[in-house]
Image (cartoon, grey):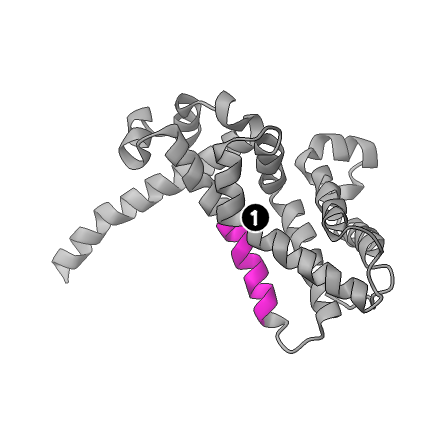
Amino acid sequence: MASSTAESRPQARTAATRDKIERSAMAAFSEVGFDAASTREIARRADVKQQLITYHYGSKLELWKAAVDRLFGEFADRLNTRRIGLEGVDESTQTWLLLREFILFSAERPQVARFMMHEGAVPGPRLTWLYERHTRKFFEDLVGRIKRAQQSGIAAEGDPMQLVYIVLGAVAMFSHPAEADLMTKGLSRKPESLERYVELVLRLVLPDAPSPSG
């Protein structure tokens, strides 16, 4: 037992170090993008030696991938948990509540929108990697749901992907909280205001859908 405990201590320290580094990396990469973020600054934020980043990740790119995996993994877990909770519910309600969950998560974790804004500005291998690994399935699922909602008469007419982008554009507000606070006098952070915003956005995409409670 004592040996097992002794062996677990270095593992716990390694996990704690990686946790600090990845959290700092998420913040840095989402704020200024891959090119402008430095491993020196990430190490400073994490309060670790810069050499530890090389030791644990090998390169800035691998650290970026670890940060993306962590952030978008949290997003996928959140949506999957919601999906499981909605099993047996009609699809229009599922679509409404999954889109609502996406908007709420984006409000809580604006780093998602910031990552996409940085990487989506120009084509490149990082964007392709992020899309193939994390966002393609999400987009394809939403497009399919909106197509079926159009067929059932509850979604707005138009290109389903453009309707998806209406929702994606709506969450961009959360990626600039200082601006949003200034423009809305802080209302964007209040739960009741956020729920009204969610309703407004979803009514643009699903104007004739019933409005279920969350």
Question: On screen, 157 above or below 84?
Answer: above
- Location of the N terminus by quadrant is bottom left
Can residue 103 be seen by looking at this rendering? Answer: yes
Direction from residue 91 to residue 136 in the image, left or right: left
Residue nearer the viewer, 11 or 110: 110
Question: On screen, 213 above or below 59?
Answer: below
Residue nearer the viewer, 34 or 123: 123
Residue at the left extreme, as displayed: 3
Residue nearer the viewer, 202 or 17: 202
Residue ID at (82%, 52%): 158
Q: Does 68 appear in magenta?
A: no
What residue type is disc 1 on?
Thr
Residue ID at (39%, 29%): 60
**Residue 182 place in picture, x, y as percent:** 79, 30
**The quadrant where residue 177 appears:** top right
Q: Does 74 appear in magenta?
A: yes
**The quadrant where residue 205 appears:** bottom right
Residue ID at (51%, 21%): 36
Residue ID at (82%, 32%): 183
**Residue 72 place in picture, x, y as percent:** 52, 48
Circle 1: element type:
helix
Residue at the bottom extreme, as displayed: 88
Q: What secondary structure predominates along the stretch shown in magenta?
A: helix
Question: On screen, 88 above or below 79?
Answer: below
Q: How many marks?
A: 1
Can residue 96 be seen by looking at this rendering? Answer: no
Q: Which residues are magenta?
A: 72-84
Residue at the right extreme, as displayed: 208
Q: Residues within 10 Å of mark 1 (few under 14, many from 20)?
A: some
Q: Circle 1 is placed at which residue position?
A: 135
